[in-house]
Image (spheres, rainbow, N blue to C red):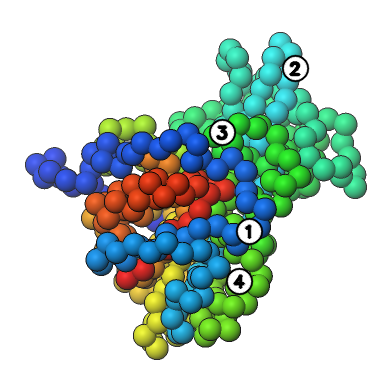
Amino acid sequence: MSSESISPPPSSSSDEIDPFDDVSLYDYELPEGLIAKEPLPQRDASRLLVLDRNTGAIQHRGIRDLADLLLPGDCLVLNDTQVLPARLIGQRTKTGGKWEGLYLGQAENNDWRLIGQTRGYLKPGESVVLIPLGQPSANPLESLQLTLIDREEDGVWRMRAEPVGDVVELLQQFGTMPLPPYMHRKIANDNDRQRYQTTYASHPGSVAAPTAGLHLTESLLAKVQERGIDIARVTLHVGLGTFRPISTTTLSGHSMHSEWCEIDEAAVRTIQAARERGGRVVAVGTTSVRTLETASADGDLKPWRGATSIFIRPPYRFRCVDALLTNFHLPRSTLFVLVSALAGLERVQAAYAEAIRERYRFFSYGDAMLILP
């Protein structure tokens, strides 16, 4: 099982013109009223726009039709990562000023890696004291202190937690679900704690939800399997690579942060068996796509465990994924770019325009799109 890092393909040479490189091509105008700030009362009540990636034809269905839209012999691939309560709020011990941060993971020496913001400039050696935001712990701490050790080149902070403890338990007590800023609430409510998590989440590590999977219920997945469609699971812990916006004017100028992902031997066998019988590989979410394409970078799908910074952008030849269930993504995002690589930029722009006309709900708690070959 490989554990090396997969990076983006090299950009075109300077004397070549890439017609897909301009970030403005991946922009669109979205009315504020179509941004879903709350989930629907039922997970599987979302609408589903079905796009034929070959013809551009569009159907308007519902997520509950998913099993009927797939074919016996297909394989549905889920990302079973679990979202951590990674959003943190605290006070600077030196000034008393407010500090906010987002936990990204642990460094080799168990220091915490975060992105943070505060008024002024936090110097190495300075500390913040976290305010408990989450659920009561079996072994509650009165306070948790983070001391800045260093800043990495990409703006990530390294901080040392005191007292030392199990990270997941500490985040459960001092953190809150890291909701996107367009939901306009910094502290997740009880509904968010359940609904901003897939029903099959089992491996803690993400700082954002793999949102396409938020629609799927146990009964819907059972219906999928009853139709003769296999289910395979992979893991990609969503980090900065997925949700950090593109700040450059060209795709070739954007650097993807690495994220940890894994696909094991059992999942590889399930997917290969589907392929051998003529079935399609249907990824649930762009994170599943990135995992599958990382693990098949040399042409053959293999077990994989390690970091990936793959940036899937047009033109890209998909080696594993045939179809995709995904939400509607922010303009100028790497997710919108990935979807355009699979279905074609013009067809995706047309599908988004149709979704806006039909008043679909957008982003994490919004409706879904199914791209079929």
Instruction: Identify residue type, mark 2.
Output: Thr
The circle on residue 286 is none
The nearer-to-camera label among 4 and 2 is 4
Q: How many other residues sit within 10 Å of disc 3, few (<14), some (14-19) or many (≥20)?
A: few
Residue at coordinates 33% horizontally, 47% vertically from top-left? 353
Quarter of the image where the C terminus is located: bottom left
Label 1 sits on residue: 43
What separation in Å lies between label 3 and label 4 (alpha carbons)? 30 Å
Residue 245 picture location, percent across and down: 42, 37
Sooner in the amino-acid sequence: mark 1 or mark 4: 1
As helix, strand or loop, the secondary structure at mark 3 comes to: helix
The nearer-to-camera label among 2 and 3 is 3
What separation in Å lies between label 1 and label 3 (alpha carbons)? 21 Å
- Viewer-proximal residue among 277 and 66: 66
The nearer-to-camera label among 1 and 2 is 1
As helix, strand or loop, the secondary structure at mark 4 comes to: helix
The circle on residue 220 is 4
As helix, strand or loop, the secondary structure at mark 1 comes to: helix
Residue at coordinates 54% horizontally, 53% vertically from top-left? 211
- Viewer-proximal residue among 367 and 98: 367
Sooner in the amino-acid sequence: mark 3 or mark 4: 3
What separation in Å lies between label 1 and label 4 (alpha carbons)? 10 Å
What separation in Å lies between label 1 and label 2 (alpha carbons)? 42 Å
Instruction: Identify residue type, mark 3.
Output: Pro
Sooner in the amino-acid sequence: mark 1 or mark 3: 1
Do the residues bearing badges 1 and 2 touch, measured as CB atoms within 8 Å? no
Above or below, 247 relative to 287 = above
Sooner in the amino-acid sequence: mark 1 or mark 2: 1
Label 2 sits on residue: 93
Instruction: Identify residue type, mark 1.
Output: Arg
